[in-house]
Image: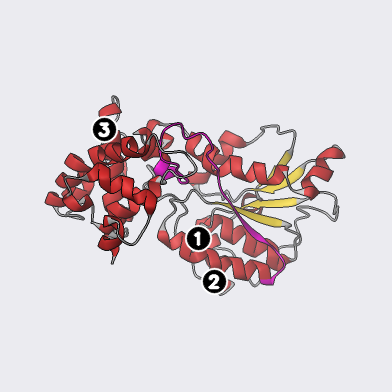
Amino acid sequence: MIDLTARPPQLDFFADNESVPVLAALGLGVDSVAMLVELVERGERVDAALFADTGSERPQTYAYLPIFKEWLEKRGVPLIVVKYEPKNFKNYPPYRTLESNCLTNGTLPSKAFGFGSCSSKWKIQPQELWADRWEPARRCWAAGGKVIKLIGYDCSPADQKRYADRAGQDDPKYSYRYPLRELGWKREDCIARIKAAGLPVPVKSACFFCPVSKPHELHDLEKPLLRRIVLMEARAKPRLRDIDGLWRKPVKGLRGATPRPGSMTEYIVEKELLPIEEVEMIVERAPQHLMSFQEAVADIDISQRPELQRWIELFDMTNGSLMQTPNTPNLYSEMVANDEDSPLASQAA
């Protein structure tokens, strides 16, 4: 554990070259928060902290955002929220979140298939697009320099692999620094540093349906989010060939691993996190309701076409039952009007 009373000397992370901008990639988890707390309280220069919002983060992360934003900005560091902005919706309802992206296409996030393009698309790209428009970065690149980008990987085993995958990569625009690794900190050191600053310790930064979630983390989710996990797996099920669900394949529990199925829905049923009748209703009916909504609004001009989030709100409002109405297409059409007489408005009232 680090001794916070015996501070090591300045690490000369960034020197005093004001022409070299310093950006921090902020996930709002333990590591990235501890990294910024330590650097800011050391007096190191950080020009901006970028939080890429997938629109599907855990509720605790959204609750933590204003707390840490206030802490940073009181110390002169702006916290900027960036988002991926989809543009080509074809005939589908517009979507703004990773969850809605998966529901639109009837698939799962790429991590479920062993890839990482969801992070690239929804996390890295919006940060880089913001930096491309940022005048300090533009001046730095025009002068032949590189922007310093801070990454919060620590020295714990889980981050060793992530660091090994990135170490040594040459980027023409960025010079990557890993302050926690240069300090030799592990996760417990990061937690201690956050507590020493008088801040609450954040939860792990991830989408509520992230395939790398641990089984126990599902127990912390509220029922509406559990229903949406069931919905996501049910919507994707017809296209799955080699995996069972968000967790890919079952884990038997050998060598200390926590046993679990490959499907989060199966775990939710097994642990009675939702009533079995409710899960069966969602699996049987919700995907078809969603596709009916897509069909009902497909020919509406994109400027007036209701967004998929409207359908998700209806799903949440009715606990996944979708009102059991036989006139679903008309209901969806009335979403466009958004007046007080629509079934959606009357249900909300």
Q: Which SS class for mark 3?
A: helix
Q: What residue is shown at x 85% (from left), y 54% (from top)?
A: 18
**Residue 237 versus residue 334 in the image, above or below:** above
**Residue 288 versus residue 186 in the image, above or below:** above
Marks 3 and 2: in contact by CB < 8 Å?
Answer: no
Decide if residue 140 is on the left or right side of residue 312.
right
Horizontal and vertical percent for residue 334? 32, 49
* Quadrant for the C terminus in the image: bottom left
Task: Kindly report the distance in space between the C-alpha atoms of the residues bearing marks 2 and 3.
Answer: 42 Å
The boundaries of the magenta stretch are 74-100
* Residue at the top extreme, as displayed: 241
Please tell me which residue lies in front, 328 or 24: 328
Q: Which numbered disc flags the more N-terminal residue, 1 or 2?
A: 1
Q: Which numbered disc flags the more N-terminal residue, 2 or 3?
A: 2
Residue 290, magenta (yes or no): no
Name the residue that disc number 2 marks. Answer: 199
Task: State the predominant SS element of the stretch in magenta.
Answer: loop
Identify the disc placed on residue 188: 1
Please tell me which residue lies in front, 116 or 338: 338
Task: Kindly report the distance in space between the C-alpha atoms of the residues bearing marks 1 and 2.
Answer: 15 Å
The answer to whether residue 3 is seen in the rendering is no
Horizontal and vertical percent for residue 62? 47, 61
Q: Which SS class for mark 1?
A: helix
Name the residue that disc number 3 marks. Answer: 237
What's the residue type where badge 3 is placed? Answer: Lys
Colour scheme employed for the rendering of this structure: secondary structure
